[in-house]
Amino acid sequence: MSAHEFSPDEIDAVYRAIAARRDMRHFIERAVDADVLARLLAAAHRAPSVGYMQPWRFIRVVDRGLRSRLRDLVENERQRTAVALGEAGNRFMQLKIDGLDRCGEVLVVALTDGRSRHVFGRRTMPEMDLASAACAIQNMWLAARAEGLGMGWVSMFEPADVAALFDMPDGARPIAILCLGHVDAFYDRPMLEAEGWAERLDLERLVGRDGWPVPDTRET
Amino acid sequence: MSAHEFSPDEIDAVYRAIAARRDMRHFIERAVDADVLARLLAAAHRAPSVGYMQPWRFIRVVDRGLRSRLRDLVENERQRTAVALGEAGNRFMQLKIDGLDRCGEVLVVALTDGRSRHVFGRRTMPEMDLASAACAIQNMWLAARAEGLGMGWVSMFEPADVAALFDMPDGARPIAILCLGHVDAFYDRPMLEAEGWAERLDLERLVGRDGWPVPDTRET
């Protein structure tokens, strides 16, 4: 086995983390160890980024007042989303959509200011810095799961309001409120699947050979 | 140890995959095992997605003519990027920016059509489906690394041209050309770092407490 090779057990562990990771909304009130948090942030920073721009910025929200105002912003958007969903709004309002009430750590992730300087791999698709930051968050998510911590990505907020709350520089853009913390148990399957909100799509219908997969996969 | 817990060795394996994953551009000509490819796609499909919309669609590009036309589209954008980079254009042209010449598999990843139906978590940030698809790609990347395969994400193309090449439905949007395959060796560090294009930023300067991190981190 070469130094670059992973053992069968190591390969299994990576797949296990991928399969067992969940978008968590239910936490127990318990602090996250500072060393663990540091490892998770370091894992995020190991993500690939377009043109190596490393666009991710993190705000650790410790102040209780700030956390409370952040919760208010999420609640506002939750109400607006329910209206926008029309008939499905009532069902939606019964879902728990964030863990800000109890999670041990809250991290706001934002794309940095000064992004327009970075052209490499972004000339036609400037949104690629978001893709890079999402890879960073996924790294963190998988590492957290391995460490036994749950994490949830809340995207239900008005970005301008969150940017204002933390006095972000012009051009910076918040993309995630991450709830991180200890959990009683991880969901056996995605919460929205368990709640009957949506079903897992059939992977075979999402993969095409030399062309688009089976049309209208979303209609069935 | 509870059934949900990871052993220390498993935790290490997850961190190892995160640290050893590289955005690869150099491949050797050798086929990717069909079973491995299936596992990698299944890993991608395990990603989180906003409102459980599972927006990712994959096109496996097998036809040599299609692959060649895809390479032409990347080359066109490479030339345009060099112009857009101005003074840095010459240095840029010396970088290898894709592995389409030799990699065993080429996968085009696209966001599905019909995205406007999905409001959950996207009302204020419709681009969150890209974030979900990026998480799927990161899953695949880490699993590929564990399996000993390299992967590279090429975002240097005009999305409309790639959509046309594969006759994608209205509203679908290609976000990645993934080059996947066997490699002689993984880069010890990110290629763009080794080539002196950019340096890894200091993580401490990317993390703020209750506010934006040290200002102007990108200026130094």
Image: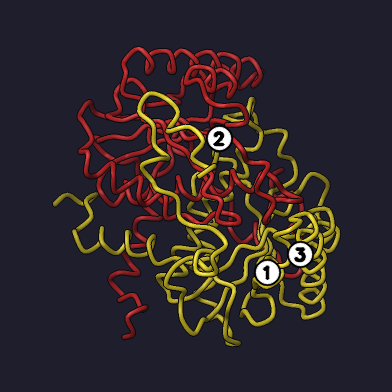
Chain colours: A red, B yellow
Residue at horizontal 75 percent and vertical 70 percent from the top: A210
Q: Position of residue B206 (x, y in %)?
A: 42, 40
Q: Position of residue A53 (x, y in %)?
A: 56, 51
Q: Which residue is mark 2?
A: B51
Question: Which element carries disc 3, helix, strand or loop?
Answer: helix
Front tag of 3 and 2: 3
For mark 1, name the chain.
B
Please name whichever residue, A6 or B78, is drawn nearer the observer in this view of the structure: B78
**Upstream in sequence: badge 1 or badge 3:** 1
Tag 3 and tag 2 share a subunit: yes
Q: Which residue is mark 3?
A: B78
Q: Residues within 10 Å of mark 3 (few under 14, many from 20)?
A: many
Residue at horizontal 62 percent and vertical 45 percent from the top: B130
Residue at horizontal 58 percent and vertical 21 percent from the top: A158
Q: What is the three-letter code of the residue carrying label 1?
A: Arg
Judge from the rendering whether residue B189 lies leftward or rightward of residue B103; answer left or right. left
**Upstream in sequence: badge 3 or badge 2:** 2
Judge from the rendering whether residue B108 lies leftward or rightward of residue B213; answer left or right. right
Q: CA distance from mark 3 to mark 2?
A: 35 Å
Q: Residues within 10 Å of mark 2 (few under 14, many from 20)?
A: many
State the image quarter where residue B161 is shown: bottom right
Question: Which element carries disc 2, helix, strand or loop?
Answer: helix
State the image quarter where residue B58 is shown: bottom right
Is residue A213 visible to us here?
no
